[in-house]
Every structure is written in structure tokens, then in C-alpha cells.
């Protein structure tokens, strides 16, 4: 393998250390406040290498890494740890971290995204939760978050203690749905008695949650009550 030539000046001016930056501009703080997508390539690499040298910040060292291939992350993904170690401030641990992160990114990019199941019937919704909830001794409230195509985004555990508990109020029920951009939700809870027939409280609170969802622009498409091998669908029984 031919030796790569690194295009950086060894006497580049030193930038500010990360701890000297305003808190809102520090890479880790930016990730927590604005999301990982808000970081530049140099800032992402700085998070991976964690620290710089005595004279250079992690971001400056990260900029040197990018300069190795004129900012091309694709080219960096072919580097071996030994090549990263030619940059001052990059030892074995940091070089291996960089190589591993770049390889992981390559694998993610080349892997097909698994197809999410489409939930179109109460039976399909009940099947998602039946084995998880049917034997529990306490009422547990969960939701299935769906995208606009009716495909499952994720299952979310909301509370233990039943619908009448304060932890099953709209803020908790819809918090994850709002974060994940769900178009609709299916409410699900179990009856430890094994009888999935809804109580008056189940029906009343479901209607409250339907109204709350309308305000948020999130449709409550069903409420499934799980019993022992049986289920009850409020949508099928026109109780929503």
C-alpha cells in the first residue's frame, strides 16, 4: 500500500481549547442541546478523540485529521490506525477509536434498513404486545408509535399502575410520540385478571387521550386491552 501524503502545516496556529469555548459551542454540549447533526465534521471527530495535546485542542487535532484527505470522510474510512497515529496527539487508543467509528459508519451505510411492520388490524396490534403483557400482575400501559404509513416506529412503555394513575396522563402518553414524529398511536394496556373487557374508567380516559391527541395532531387509532390470550379493541367496538 503506498504511503499517503498528509496536507497540513505542522506549525499551524493553535485554536482555543474546548474548555475555553462558550458552553453552547462545546461539541458534547451541542449534541445534547441541538442533536448530533448540528456538529461539523471536525467537531464529530473531536468527540471521538476526546482530548487534544498540550498545545492544541481536540478540535484542532480533528482538523488535522480532516486535512489528511482534504476533508474527505470517505477517504479516511480506508485508513489504518497506524496512519492516524502519524498525527501529533493521536495514539493507539484514539487511532483505534477513529478506525472503529469509521468502519461502523460504513457498515451502517451499506446495511439495508429493516422493513418496519405495518399495523393494519387490531389482531396485529394485539400480537405485538400479547406475550409481553398477558401474564403481568400489574396493569402496564404502553403505546405503539406509527408513522404516516401505519408502520411501527417503536413500542413505548408509559407507566405501571393502570390508566387511572397520574403517570398515564397525556403528557407522558404522547411525549415519545412527539419526539419521534409519530403520525398515530395505538394505546395498549393489560388486565391482570385475564378479562380484557374495558371498565368505565378505561373508556373515559381513552376518550380524554383521543382529544389530547387531536390537539397535538396525533391520531389515537385504537386502544387494545390485553387479557390472558384474549384482547379487546375499542376501535373495533366503536368506543373511541
Image (tube, helix red, strand yellow):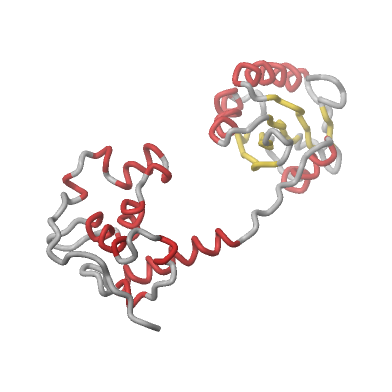
Residue in the foreground of this view, choosing between 167 and 39: 39
Direction from residue 28 to residue 115 in the image, left or right: right
Residue in the foreground of this view, choosing between 70 and 150: 70
Where is 214 relative to 39, above or below? above
Q: Quadrant of the N terminus?
A: bottom left
Q: Residue 194's x, y, as percent?
A: 82, 38
Direction from residue 202 to residue 82 in the image, left or right: left
Q: Quadrant of the C terminus?
A: top right
Q: Which image quadrant for residue 49?
A: bottom left
Q: Residue 153's x, y, as percent?
A: 65, 41
Direction from residue 134 to residue 29 in the image, left or right: left
Q: Which image quadrant for residue 151?
A: top right
Q: Give the residue at x 65% y 58%.
A: 112
- Taking the view exactly as shown, the residue that stands out farthest to the bottom is 1
Q: Residue 207's x, y, as percent?
A: 72, 17
Direction from residue 195 to residue 150 in the image, left or right: left
Residue in the foreground of this view, choosing between 216 and 42: 42
Marker count (numbered): 0
Q: Is residue 135 visible?
A: yes
Q: Residue 27's x, y, as percent?
A: 31, 47
Q: Is residue 140 visible?
A: no
Q: Give the residue at x 14% y 60%.
A: 12
Q: Give the residue at x 30% y 66%.
A: 68
Q: Give the residue at x 27% y 70%.
A: 6
Residue in the foreground of this view, choosing between 52 and 86: 86
Amino acid at each position: 500500500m503506498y504511503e499517503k501524503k498528509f496536507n497540513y502545516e505542522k506549525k499551524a496556529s493553535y485554536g482555543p481549547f474546548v474548555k475555553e469555548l462558550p458552553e453552547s459551542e462545546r461539541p458534547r454540549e451541542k449534541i445534547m442541546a441541538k442533536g448530533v447533526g448540528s456538529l461539523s465534521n471536525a467537531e464529530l471527530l473531536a468527540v471521538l478523540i476526546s482530548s487534544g495535546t498540550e498545545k492544541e485542542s481536540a478540535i484542532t487535532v480533528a482538523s488535522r485529521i480532516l486535512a489528511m484527505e482534504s476533508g474527505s470522510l470517505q477517504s479516511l474510512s480506508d485508513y489504518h490506525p497506524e496512519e492516524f497515529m502519524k498525527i501529533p496527539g493521536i495514539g493507539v487508543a484514539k487511532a483505534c477509536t477513529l478506525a472503529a467509528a469509521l468502519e461502523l459508519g460504513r457498515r451502517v451505510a451499506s446495511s439495508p434498513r429493516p422493513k418496519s411492520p405495518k399495523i393494519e388490524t387490531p389482531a396485529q396490534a394485539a400480537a405485538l404486545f400479547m406475550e409481553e403483557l398477558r401474564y403481568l400482575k400489574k396493569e402496564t400501559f404502553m403505546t405503539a408509535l406509527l408513522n404516516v404509513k401505519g408502520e411501527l416506529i417503536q413500542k413505548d412503555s408509559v407507566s405501571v399502575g393502570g390508566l387511572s394513575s397520574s403517570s398515564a396522563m397525556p403528557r407522558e402518553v404522547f411525549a415519545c410520540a412527539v419526539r419521534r414524529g409519530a403520525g398515530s398511536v395505538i394505546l395498549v394496556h393489560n388486565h391482570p385478571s385475564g378479562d380484557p373487557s374495558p371498565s368505565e374508567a378505561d373508556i373515559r380516559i381513552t376518550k380524554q387521550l383521543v382529544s389530547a391527541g387531536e390537539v397535538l395532531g396525533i391520531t389515537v387509532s385504537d386502544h387494545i386491552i390485553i387479557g390472558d390470550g384474549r384482547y379487546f379493541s375499542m376501535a373495533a367496538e366503536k368506543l373511541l
